[in-house]
Image (cartoon, rainbow, N blue to C red):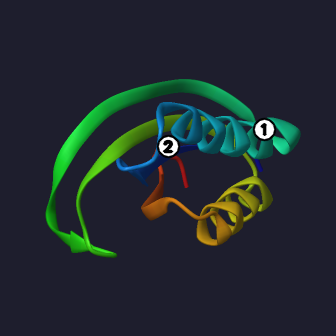
Amino acid sequence: MIRKYELMYIVDSSLPEEGIKSIVEKINNVIGKKGELVEQQNLGEKKLAYTIKKRQKGVYIFSVLKGEQETVNEAERTLKITDGVLRYLTIRADTAP
């Protein structure tokens, strides 16, 4: 069943701009294979609430996507193994049962 999801992930801000763009493109390609990227926003560099992997700042990326659970699983797997990604969170955005 195709559902709408919101994905927020934090990329290490000490990476060069090209490195951050390549991570975003990598995630977008994974989503695009089996789902649809509806919207994406780069929220910029922000101070983290607590230190993660000895980092105090990170670049926040917010994405809205449509797809099946398999699409989300693959995107989360890719985020987990990608160097430079500090944290991620996916939530289901639709309220239909």
Q: Which amino acid does label 1 sit on?
A: Asn
Q: What is the CA distance from the residue labelled 2 to the residue labelled 1?
A: 23 Å
Q: In which quarter of the image is the C terminus?
A: bottom right
Residue, x 67% and y 45% (percent of image)? 27
**On screen, 66 above or below 90?**
above
Q: In this orientation, which residue lies closer to the viewer: 69 or 12?
A: 12
Q: What is the number of the mark on residue 21?
A: none
Number of marks in picture = 2
Residue, x 31% and y 31% (percent of image)? 43
Question: Visible in this render: residue 11?
Answer: yes
**Residue 75 placed where, x, y %?**
69, 56
Residue, x 42% and y 26% (percent of image)? 41
**Residue 87 placed where, x, y %?**
41, 65
- 32 left or right, relative to 17: right
Badge 2, how many Cα within 10 Å: few under 14, some, many 20+? few
**Residue 3 placed where, x, y %?**
65, 44
**On screen, 82 above or below 1?**
below
Which quadrant of the structure image shows residue 82? bottom right
- Considering the numbered disc 2 on the image, is that residue within a helix, a strand or a loop? loop
Which residue is labeled 2 in the image?
94
**Residue 66 placed where, x, y %?**
67, 37
- 91 left or right, relative to 29: left
Q: Nearer the viewer, mark 2 or mark 1?
A: 1
**On screen, 8 above or below 32?**
below
Q: Which amino acid does label 2 sit on?
A: Asp
- 51 left or right, relative to 89: left
- Considering the numbered disc 1 on the image, is that residue within a helix, a strand or a loop? helix
Question: Visible in this render: residue 3?
Answer: no
N-terminal-most mark, 2 or 1: 1
- 59 left or right, relative to 56: right
Q: What is the number of the mark on residue 29?
A: 1
